Amino acid sequence: MKLATVKEILNAEVVTGEQYLNNEVKSAFGCDLMSDVLAFIKEETVLLTGLANPQVIRTAEMIDVYAIVFVRGKRPSRQIVEMAEQRNITLMTTDYILYTACGKLYEKGLRGVNVKGDVVDD
């Protein structure tokens, strides 16, 4: 699924990285625990989180995640935006809660990641 489609489905605002909206993601992962993100996510996954601090960007960089959606209307600080810009990470924000945002993406065909880090195929 293209990031532009993720943006549309979630009625999201792009904070930075609009030039990357044609990038594809194969799965989504909703989580606020960065240790779980490190344990389970592989590249080409969009991260949905309510955690808006620099650790999210550092974690995304470590596992080559290039798209983050902040839920519940969370707005990243200027520091977070600058960090994302330096790392070519797209940041979006949506008013949906984490559960709803993940459900909307799942409903449109974007699958999650299981505990082995594989994309779930239903």
Image (spheres, rainbow, N blue to C red):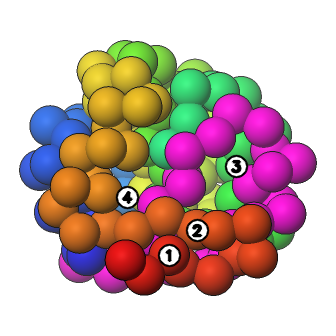
> Is there a contact, CB below 8 Å, between mark 1 and mark 2?
yes
- Which circle's residue, 2 or 4, is located before the other in the chain? 4
- Judging by the rendered image, the residue that carries numbered circle 3 is 57
- Judging by the rendered image, the residue that carries numbered circle 4 is 17
Query: Magenta segment, which residues?
Result: 20-47
Alpha-carbon span between mark 3 and mark 1: 25 Å
Q: Residue at x 70, y 49 (%)?
A: 57
Q: Mark yes or no: residue 61 visible.
A: no
Alpha-carbon span between mark 1 and mark 4: 27 Å
- Judging by the rendered image, the residue that carries numbered circle 2 is 113
- Which circle's residue, 3 or 1, is located before the other in the chain? 3
Point out residue 60 in the picture as x, y percentages from the top left corner: 70, 59
Q: Is residue 115 left or right of residue 19?
A: right
Residue type pointed to by label 2: Val
On residue 120, the disc is 1
Q: Residue at x 37, y 77 (%)?
A: 122
Image quadrant assignment for residue 38: bottom right
Q: Residue at x 49, y 64 (%)?
A: 112
